[in-house]
Amino acid sequence: MHPHEFWQTFSPGPPPPAPWNDRYPARMPDGRVLWLPIRTLTDGKGIASLILNQASFEVEETLAHQLAEGLRRHAPEVIVGLPTLGLGLARAVAARLGHARMVPLGTSRKFWYDEALSVPMSSITSPGADKRLYVDPRMLPLIQGRRVALIDDVASSGASMRAGLSLLNAIDCAPVAMGVAMRQTDRWRTLTQAPLEGVFDTPLLTPAPGGGWRENT
């Protein structure tokens, strides 16, 4: 596959066994496969990558539909989206749940924002970035006292989700659920404040004898 061909379509299942070369076959709930490029980390391990705003509309809409179905049992009244790649997914999930809007968090400070309504934020895909996560003060009446689901594109180290949870906790909001398209490895499992719904899971990968990648054991 060429780089621009990832995240564009689903393939029939079942997924082929390891070793995998430059791509990982992520299995969808309906048995189909979404091929994801494998990125090498600084420690030599590998992870499967999903960049949702580069995905086809078919893939994006399918993931949003499946995540909405997973979140439906938690009966969220408000969907809150994490920047940047979680915002589009949050909007699509909210629409599928019949909501009229969603609430976006942001990393761009507007002049009417309150610095007290912000927390530091980092992510595995933006190491070393000095950012803060903000909630628009005008959005507080939409969140406080409501059943909130916090949405991002991927849960990996959990850093982005922790920032979102910290910010919501600062305004006395404890989400009833969190949701992502991909739960990447198992480092997110320390996020114990609310159930984390995901459409599919991908493991930590390690080089396989003879070449390629296999699941880290």
Image (cartoon, rainbow, N blue to C red):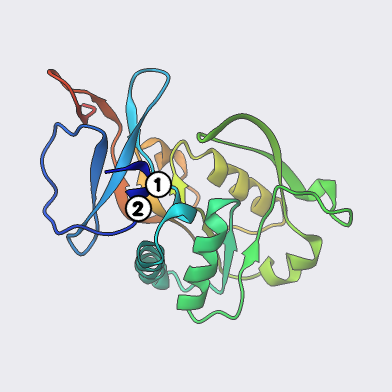
How packed mark 1 is, by other alpha carbons closer than 10 Å (few <14, some 14-19, many 20 or more), is: many
208 is higher (above) or lower (below) than 185: above
200 left or right of 76 in image: left
Classify mark 1: helix, strand or loop: loop
29 is higher (above) or lower (below) than 132: below
Name the quadrant of the N terminus.
top left
For discs 2 and 1, the disc positioned in front in the rendered view: 2
Q: Choose top left, top right, bottom left or bottom right for residue 59.
A: bottom left
208 is higher (above) or lower (below) than 47: above
For the residue marked with disc 1, what is the amino acid? Leu
Classify mark 2: helix, strand or loop: loop
How packed mark 2 is, by other alpha carbons closer than 10 Å (few <14, some 14-19, many 20 or more), is: many
Can residue 191 be seen in this snapshot?
Answer: yes
57 left or right of 108 in image: left
35 left or right of 74 in image: left
Can residue 176 be seen in this snapshot?
Answer: no
Q: Residue at x 80, y 66 (%)?
A: 138
Q: Which mark, residue 50?
A: 1
Q: Who is closer to the viewer here, 90 or 146?
A: 90
Q: Which residue is under mark 2? A: 7
Q: Are marks 2 and 1 in contact (CB under 8 Å)?
A: yes
For the residue marked with disc 2, what is the amino acid? Trp
Q: Residue at x 59, y 62 (%)?
A: 80
Q: In x, y percent, where is residue 69? A: 36, 71
Q: In x, y percent, where is residue 130? A: 70, 32
